[in-house]
Image: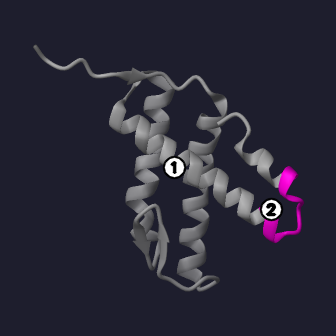
Amino acid sequence: MDKVRKRYWISNENWIFNLESMHDKMLAIGEELDDGTINGPVEILGHVADSSYDLEALKEECSDLLSAAKSRPLSEEEYANAREIVYWRAANRYLTCMAAGMCEHDAGQEFNGL
């Protein structure tokens, strides 16, 4: 008998927001790499990038997961990938808040609802 594969609906709006936000963050990082505002290489979720071109696969993955999450349940693999992206994005915002001097309690609100 075939193994039943679990499927996961993403009903959490925070996940949807973070997938959209991650796509936008990759656009911003790509532009900063291209114009020299930041120096590469940078590593994001296992993707090493020296230019915006190097982030295309990650941007596409974010777009694909976002589209899937809005329209159908995700496979186990898709869900795991979405979770990794969502948590990376929240952790990145948390670190940005901490670096800007926000107290840890307030910065930790980035993880609420995940």
Residue at position x 34%, y 38% in the image? 77
| Amino acid carrying mark 2 in the image | Cys
Magenta region includes residue 63:
no
Quadrant assignment, res 17: top right
Secondary structure at badge 2 equals: helix
Q: Is residue 58 above or below residue 17?
A: below
Q: Which residues are magenta?
A: 97-106
> Label for residue 6?
none
The residue to which callout 1 is attached is: 85
- Between residue 18 and residue 52, name the one nearer to us: 18
> Label for residue 97?
2
Secondary structure at badge 1 equals: helix
Q: Residue furthest left?
A: 1
On the rendered structure, is 3 left or right of 97?
Answer: left
Residue 40, horizontal then vertical, whole percent = 50, 83
Residue 75, horizontal then vertical, whole percent = 34, 29
The quarter of the image holding the C terminus is top right
Q: Residue furthest top?
A: 1
Residue 65, horizontal then vertical, whole percent = 44, 39
On the rendered structure, is 83 left or right of 112?
Answer: left
The quarter of the image holding the N terminus is top left
| Amino acid carrying mark 1 in the image | Ile
Residue at position x 57%, y 45% in the image? 86
On the rendered structure, is 86 left or right of 107?
Answer: left
Give the main secondary structure of the magenta stretch: helix
Q: Is residue 94 above or below residue 35?
A: above
* Distance between the alpha carbons at the discs numbered 1 and 2: 18 Å
- Between residue 83 and residue 27, name the one nearer to us: 83
Q: Counting residues from the N terminus, which is met first, the one under dot 1 or under dot 2? A: 1
- Between residue 1 and residue 73, name the one nearer to us: 1
